[in-house]
């Protein structure tokens, strides 16, 4: 079978991780093209990964016959438009989360995707490909913890990125804490329960970096959610965890509870020294979800080869953005928000 030829757009923090995986760690594909507006990033692709074709014009890359598929890892505001362009030019598409920042734009993109059923579309909710989350999901699906009553999630970035985030936030729009960060937990809640979120109430506080108030950004936020069947979800999202990258999920059911990553362990090592008994923590998303990023990209390539669609689809993209925007609106207006659905 010939290899799937992939072109990547965006070679920033996460783009470099995906690019290296596609070039070195994924079976059945080759990274044949890269697109970026930054010449150094294209040099990286050429020199470090041996990518033969580089582009500064995304549309040109999607029209070229050196690729069968695109991997979109550009800033979130470009995703919808870049998905549309690639689909219309006959390419399979993987895009990073969120699918988009605006519900109407996502709906248009969903229509474009629907019109191209023979092309694979996949959205990058990589936690669904993490072995621990898959183990937990299988237990839930087998009824081993009974009927779910409550899900509690923490998704908090390490403090070491805070200074640069504050600088970024004063001049740029990340989409907000709920759309940028909590969206992974929003997807987990929908995935684990199979239910839609009905109502949300969100609050937040800037304590270490009060200047974020001026940027309309949040250092730490929390959302309380009611799902259609009255299941409850409590989400905490943040950017300021002193100890590392803290991603933790707890599911309470009528027959038991389970926790994924109760402590954000880096590995199985425990260190005993003058600080006491210390378990090193995972420090960032590429480290914690290294395997999940590989398994997710492998699934994209397998879907293309097997002519099937992956589990994570455009509707998941639409609903997760909708719920994240409802959280933001709740925080902004200090009110309970009802989440719509189609
Ligand atoms: N799954 C995860 O856990 C996770 C983690 C981090 C980021 N992300 C997502 O990945 C995406 C990228 O995030 P990042 O942190 O790598 O961002 P980044 O700012 O580090 O990188 C963005 C890249 O896009 C390029 N770019 C910008 N505009 C472009 C354009 N018009 N055409 C071509 N290239 C363009 C930039 O040169 C840069 O290479 C975001 O959508 C983000 O939400 C997901």
Image: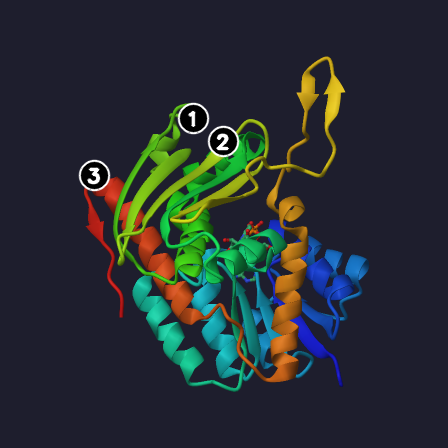
| Quadrant holding the N terminus | bottom right
Q: Which residue is mark 1?
A: 209
**Label 1 – label 3 distance at C-alpha:** 21 Å
Q: Estimate the x, y position of residue 274 in percent, counting from the top left.
A: 73, 13
Q: Are marks 3 and 2 in contact (CB under 8 Å)?
A: no
Horizontal relation, residue 217 to residue 122: left or right:
left
Considering only vertical position in the picture, is 320 above or below 13? Answer: below
Q: Are marks 1 and 2 in contact (CB under 8 Å)?
A: yes
Foreground residue, 218 or 223? 223
Q: Which residue is mark 3?
A: 334
Give residue 298's mark: none
Q: For the point 52% across and 57% down, which residue is it?
A: 139
Q: Which residue is mark 2?
A: 240
Of badges 1 and 3, nearer the viewer stands 3
Q: Secondary structure at mark 1?
A: loop
Foreground residue, 62 or 4? 4
**Label 3 – label 2 distance at C-alpha:** 23 Å
Foreground residue, 324 or 271? 271
Q: For the point 57% across and 58% down, which residue is it?
A: 134
Q: Secondary structure at mark 3?
A: loop
Whichever of labels 1 and 2 marks the residue nearer the N terminus, that label is: 1
| Quadrant holding the C terminus | bottom left
Q: Estimate the x, y position of residue 95 in percent, counting from the top left.
A: 53, 65
Q: Is the C-beta of the residue carrying label 1 under 8 Å from the nearest atom of ligand 1?
A: no
């Amino acid at each position: 079978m010939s290899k799937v030829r992939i072109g990547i757009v965006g070679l920033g923090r996460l783009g470099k991780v995906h690019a290296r995986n596609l070039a070195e760690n994924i079976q059945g594909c080759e990274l044949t093209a890269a697109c970026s507006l930054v010449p150094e990033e294209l040099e990286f692709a050429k020199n470090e990964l041996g990518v033969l074709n580089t582009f500064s014009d995304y549309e040109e890359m999607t029209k070229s016959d050196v690729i069968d598929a695109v991997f979109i890892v550009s800033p979130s505001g470009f995703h919808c438009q870049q998905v549309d362009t690639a689909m219309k030019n006959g390419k399979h598409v993987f895009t990073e989360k969120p699918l988009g920042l605006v519900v109407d734009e996502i709906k248009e993109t969903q229509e474009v995707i629907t019109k191209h059923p023979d092309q694979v579309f996949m959205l990058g909710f990589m936690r669904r490909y993490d072995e621990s989350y898959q183990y937990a999901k299988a237990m839930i699906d087998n009824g081993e913890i009974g009927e779910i009553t409550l899900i509690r999630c923490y998704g908090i970035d390490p403090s070491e990125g805070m200074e640069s985030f504050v600088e970024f936030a004063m001049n740029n729009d990340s989409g907000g804490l709920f759309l940028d960060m909590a969206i992974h937990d929003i997807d987990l809640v929908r995935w684990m329960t199979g239910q839609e979120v009905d109502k949300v109430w969100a609050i937040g506080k800037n304590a270490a970096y009060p200047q974020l108030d001026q940027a309309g950004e949040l250092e730490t936020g929390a959302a309380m959610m009611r799902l259609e069947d009255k299941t409850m979800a409590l989400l905490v999202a943040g950017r300021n965890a002193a100890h590392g990258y803290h991603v933790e999920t707890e599911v309470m059911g009528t027959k038991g509870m389970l926790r994924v990553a109760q402590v954000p362990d880096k590995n199985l090592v425990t260190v005993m020294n003058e600080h006491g008994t210390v378990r090193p923590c995972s420090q960032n998303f590429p480290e914690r979800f290294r395997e999940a990023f590989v398994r997710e990209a492998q699934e994209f390539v397998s879907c293309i080869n097997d002519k099937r669609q992956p589990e994570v689809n455009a509707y998941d993209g639409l609903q997760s953005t909708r719920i994240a925007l409802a959280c933001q609106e709740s925080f902004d207006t200090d009110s309970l928000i009802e989440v719509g659905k189609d």
